[in-house]
Image (cartoon, rainbow, N blue to C red):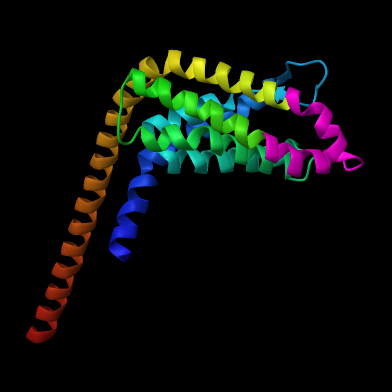
Amino acid sequence: MKESTKQVLSYHFSATHIAYMALFTALAFVVTFLEFPIFPATPYLKLDFANVFFMIEGFLFGPVEAVVSIGIKELLCLMKSSSGGVGELANFLMSTAYVIIPAVLYRFKKGRWWVAVTLVMACVMQVAVSLPVNRYINFPFFMPSGAAELFREAWPFVLAFNAVKSVIISLIVAIIYKPLSRLIKATRKKLEAHTRRVKAASKAEKTASEAEKAQKQMDENSSNLTT
């Protein structure tokens, strides 16, 4: 059991995967500075493109890497947040809901048609999760006085905003995923080959060092016997 867990962790958190997780997390964090509202009636609902990177990461590496990156990105967003983590928690839940189904299903079946189907599922999931998240997390925190009444007035905008956001992001993913995946797979192979060379060199150096120590110990023992 321990060996199996170790193998799973070593796969998901290999040097190559960690490098790409850091890259996608950094890109997702940077685009949060470019967010903007799309409905004048609800200026607090702002569109950003962070989920583009998380969805591509989920397709390429799997749900674990994508969800970890989402969590790290939200932790980074705490540095510029005024919500004390409440907004970041809401974003984490909605981004995870958007990414999780395609990232899991893509492990079992691939192809453009299947990507399109899973992206539709992702849009439905984000819209569905956005309503309870906004009703019970965002609105009570940002509008504590009369949150329920305000949400009754604003929920169509919440629904429309998340529908528009998820569709736009899904369209971008559908357009750039294939060419980007080819590039990443090529660089990934080079990075993995380099990592293997570094590990082999390190192992060889360690073996040589141990052999040298053993030889030195044998020489010392031989010298002691002669004396």
Toward which corner of the image does residue 64 lie, by quadrant?
top left
State left or right for residue 51 relative to residue 91: left
* 54 in magenta: no
**Residue sitting nearer the eye, 49 or 107:** 107
Residue at x 54%, y 26% (from the top left corner): 123
Q: How many marks?
A: 0
State left or right for residue 102 relative to residue 191: right
* 150 in magenta: yes
Residue 52 in view, yes or no: yes
Q: Which residues are magenta?
A: 131-157
Quadrant occupied by the C terminus: bottom left
Residue at x 61%, y 40% (from the top left corner): 92
Residue at x 40%, y 30% (from the top left corner): 59
Rendered location of residue 13, percent (x, y): 39, 47
In the image, is residue 212 above or below residue 173? below
Rendered location of residue 66, percent (x, y): 48, 37
Rendered location of residue 89, percent (x, y): 67, 43
In the image, is residue 207 above or below residue 192? below
Q: Give the prevailing secondary structure in the magenta stretch.
A: helix
